[in-house]
Image (spheres, rainbow, N blue to C red):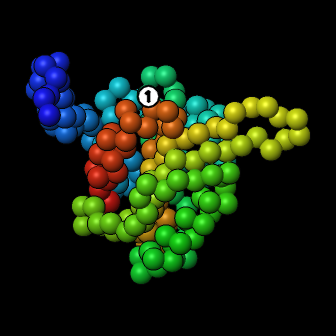
Amino acid sequence: MKIPFSFLRLAPLLVLFTLVAFVAPAPKLKKTPVGKNITLGVPEGFAALPDDGIAAKYPSPRKPLAVFSNPSGRVDVSVAQKPSTFTSHDYALLLKIYKASIQNTYSKVEFLTEDIRTINKRDFVTLEFVSSLNDTRRNANLAPIRRYQFIQYAIQGDQLYVFTFNAPAEEQPQWQPTARAVMESISMK
């Protein structure tokens, strides 16, 4: 079988493209203190939301410790803290509980990662997924809201810390390497 000439000309370009895709530069993160003895890498260009911005975007009786947003406001990194009776020995149970909670919250969930991993000598419950939320109101014709989310949970003392990276699902290919780098940068002392 004879290989067409045009393919022979394109083959080196395909190899080069494949190599560039796998050797893409690491996202630039700025080590940022969040709360007491916690730091994480915040993506370059993200800015901390002021308290009123956090209250508007994340209405809750217990506001997050910090929220960082990209210039468009479509992508966020947040850190929340709340009391917990669980201990670090309960991570396998927490993984099941939070996975079930996420499945009950959204119309559809595609899990990309669901495990317990060690980062900087600390264990985390890790859930990475794409969620869809359908509008279930009568006569609603709105398209589902789809989000890419990477969430890590950690217990320290009697507190549960929740680290979340949140982006539109259609931007997942662009933001997934950054989300993973942010989660790998978390340090809790």
Q: Report the residue marked by disc 1.
A: 70
Give the SS element for disc 1. Answer: loop
In the figure, is residue 71 to the left or right of 45? right
In the image, taking residue 85 as reference, residue 70 lies left or right, namely left
Give the image location of residue 123, x and y in percent.
34, 68
The residue shown at (51%, 37%) is 169
* Residue at (44, 74) in percent of width and height: 91
Placement of the C terminus among the 4 image quadrants:
bottom left
Q: Is residue 24 visible?
A: no
- Can you name the residue that lies furthest to the right here? 138
Q: Nearer the viewer, residue 121 or 4?
A: 4
* Type of the residue with mark 1: Asn
Q: Nearer the viewer, residue 177 or 3?
A: 3
Looking at the picture, how far across and down is residue 2, in whole percent? 13, 29
Relative image position of residue 128 (x, y in whole percent): 45, 53
> Is residue 137 found left or right of 57 in the rendered image?
right
Q: Please tell me which residue is depicted at 84% across the width and 41% down the height of the picture.
A: 137
Other residues around mark 1 within 10 Å, as few (<14) / some (14–19) / many (≥20)? some
